[in-house]
Amino acid sequence: MNKTAAVSAVLDAVRTEPIVFTTGYACRIARGIADRPNHFYMTGSMGLASSIAIGIGQQTKRPTVVVDGDGSLLMNPVGLLTAGSMRELPLVHVVLDDGRYASTGGQAVAPAGADFAALALACGYRDVRRVTDVAALGEVLREQMRVCASPVFVHCVLSDVDDLVSARVDLNLHEYTQRLRGHLRGLLAA
């Protein structure tokens, strides 16, 4: 499974609930596959996607997905600590682990082979999953969209590289924020 296949699995399983995509290839791939009102694309602030998703999940009380990267998680693990301490936070934290900073030239993420599942457990996540294929990722996400009531960590191990990645997110970032805000209002009003 590569990053494109993993992001596709997320998009297939999560149709209306909020999804925050980390900066770099994850947000570019998601926007290229299916640009939806429930998406928030990070275009900077590496390492803070989980913080945004935590805020959305806390305020809406609805299952919220964050698609994070291994490098961004290691850059700022505060999201793990925060989410792990919030027992009633409906958050699904998907970490795409390809072992490299793909969008900046493919440099290796240090430390190589970091045990993200152990890190999530140490931070207080009670439900930690490890997936290596699209079917397993989709199954976990579909299940969590039905039952998520506390933080879930999904370590998504990637073994294949992506051929082509979509262009950078090019629209006014304020428009994406307003679009998501309107979508959340609609969800809460329903």
Image (spheres, grey):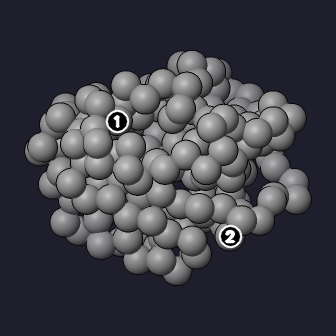
> Relative to residue 16, is residue 133 depicted above or below?
below
**Given this view, does label 2 or label 1 mark the residue nearer the observer?**
1
Q: Amino acid at mark 2?
A: Met
Residue ID at (58%, 42%): 70
Give the farthest residue toward the bottom: 135
Image position, residue 79 (x, y; %):
36, 30
Image position, residue 99 (x, y; %):
69, 48
Observer-nearest of 18 and 117 = 117
The residue labelled by disc 1 is 80
The earlier-in-sequence mark between 2 and 1 is 2
Picture quarter with the N terminus: bottom right
- Specify few, some or many for label 2: CA neighbours under 10 Å numbering under 14, 14-19, or 20 or more: some
Image position, residue 122 (x, y; %):
29, 42
Q: Amino acid at mark 1?
A: Leu
Image position, residue 176 (x, y; %):
53, 30
- Specify few, some or many for label 1: CA neighbours under 10 Å numbering under 14, 14-19, or 20 or more: many
Observer-nearest of 80 and 162 = 80
Q: Is residue 185 visible?
A: no
Q: Determine whether, in the image, residue 116 is placed left or right of residue 126.
A: right
The residue labelled by disc 2 is 1
Residue ID at (45%, 65%): 130
> Relative to residue 139, is residue 151 depicted above or below?
above
Label drawn at residue 130: none
Q: Determine whether, in the image, residue 115 is placed left or right of residue 126.
A: right
